């Protein structure tokens, strides 16, 4: 019994260190936060972005480890979901901007002159998928 608990603790710590190292590498090596502030022209708020990510990671870990449930109305969840969606979208946009994914993808697909159509298709697909998920799965 004690051996199982010790093994579980080591696996948990090892998994946490692995995920944490990957998260830090993602943010620092790719320069996501500085690029995000550069694109949004808000360099003076870089420390707020950094602390928001740290606090968000800590709160997210606490919420996922403890079965915390928030009993909020739909009207209070709407701005929270919108803020989360904006954050994920901007983070994904900054990552793709850093990696120059779109020009490479457009060149390989042979649609360099229609890259705006490619981007709009991806954006509209994401919007439709998110709306379908929220409308169909949230209340069922």
Image (spheres, rainbow, N blue to C red):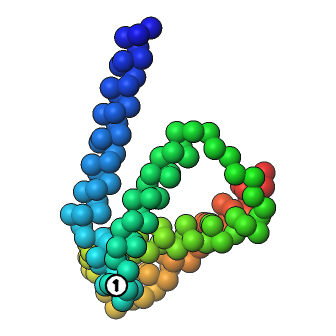
Left or right, 26 with respect to 124, comes to left
Q: Is residue 6 above or below residue 113?
A: above
Residue 49: where, in percent of width, then height?
Answer: 39, 72
Which quarter of the image is occupied by the N terminus? Answer: top left
Instruction: Give SS at disc 1.
Output: helix
Q: Dot 1 corresponds to which residue?
A: 44
**Residue 9's quadrant in the figure?**
top left
Residue nearest the observer in this picture, 35 or 119: 35
The residue positioned 28% from the left and 76% from the top of the image is 34
Residue 87: where, in percent of width, then height?
Answer: 48, 70
**Residue 130's quadrant in the figure?**
bottom right
The residue positioned 76% from the left and 69% from the top of the image is 75
Residue most extreme to the left: 29
The residue positioned 47% from the left and 59% from the top of the image is 56
Q: Is residue 66 above or below residue 34?
A: above
Residue 101 showing in the rendered view: no
Residue 7 showing in the rendered view: yes
Residue nearest the observer in this picture, 24 or 133: 24
């Amino acid at each position: 019994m004690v051996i199982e608990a010790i093994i579980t603790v080591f696996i948990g710590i090892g998994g946490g260190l692995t995920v944490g190292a990957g998260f830090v590498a993602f943010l620092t090596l790719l320069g996501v936060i500085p690029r995000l502030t550069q694109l949004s022209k808000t360099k003076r708020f870089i420390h707020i972005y950094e602390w928001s990510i740290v606090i968000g990671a800590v709160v997210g870990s606490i919420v996922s480890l403890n079965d915390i449930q928030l009993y909020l109305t739909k009207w209070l969840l709407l701005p929270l979901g919108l803020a989360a969606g904006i954050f994920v979208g901007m983070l994904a946009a900054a990552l793709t901007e850093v990696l120059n994914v779109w020009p490479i993808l457009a060149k390989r697909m042979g649609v360099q002159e229609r890259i705006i159509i490619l981007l709009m298709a991806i954006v509209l697909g994401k919007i439709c998928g998110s709306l379908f998920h929220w409308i169909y799965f949230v209340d069922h």
